Amino acid sequence: MPQSLSKVYVHITFSTKYRLPSIDDSIQSDLWNYLGGICKQLECNPVQIGGYNDHVHILCTLSRKISQMYLVEKLKTGSSKRIKTQGAYYSNFYRQNGYGIFSVNPTEIDRVIAYIQGQKEHHTKQAFQSEFLAFLHKYAIAYDEKYVRD
């Protein structure tokens, strides 16, 4: 086969350092757009980006040219640098070290889009830590509890 083809959807999530509510309404739109720009630059088509005040969700395709780790590193470092330019209040903004990246079945794309769009309402009922634990359980991922405690 003379052609290499790929379409892998991934759902990425990562939080602010110490899960502080540092992503307020005044920077959310710019942040989501900026993250989308990073995805496009890396040929990882952004499908839906959103989150809440202490974390981010990104649904995108994974380019066949880069690794998961490289994509997440670029998203985290690029967005942190961007936020720090938004004024003195954000000068001490940092991301948590870890992240989650999960495969998404193409038949579930609409469901994941709706889930990301509903983050503000969703987090009136459930904290990010509980949400992240649910992903780990769904995907049967072993983890160290000290890093995901409520």
Image (tube, grey):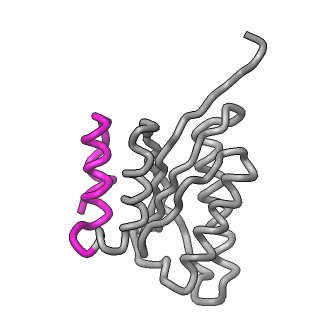
Is residue 126 a member of the stretch shown in magenta? yes
- Give x and y (percent) for residue 148: 30, 54
In which quadrant is the C terminus drawn? Answer: bottom left
Q: Is residue 56 above or below residue 134?
A: below
Residue 59 is left or right of residue 67, and the answer is left
Total numbered badges shown on the rendered structure: 0
Among the 4 quarters of the image, the one containing residue 8: top right
Residue 127 is left or right of residue 63, and the answer is left
Q: Nearer the viewer, residue 84 or 124?
A: 124
Residue 25 is left or right of residue 120, and the answer is right
Name of the residue lying farthest toward the top: 1
In which quadrant is the N terminus drawn? Answer: top right
Residue occupying the point 29% across, 60% down: 129
Q: In this view, does 81 lie above or below 58?
A: below
Residue occupying the point 71% across, 21% down: 4
Residue occupying the point 42% across, 66% down: 117
- Give x and y (percent) for residue 32: 58, 68
- Give x and y (percent) for residue 82: 68, 72
Name of the residue lying farthest toward the bottom: 88
Q: Is residue 3 above or below residue 16?
A: above
Per the rendered image, the range of residues in magenta is 124-150
Is residue 74 a member of the stretch shown in magenta? no
Among the 4 quarters of the image, the one containing residue 130: bottom left
Q: Which of 129 and 103 is in front in this view?
A: 103
Q: Is residue 55 above or below residue 137?
A: below
Residue occupying the point 44% across, 63% down: 15
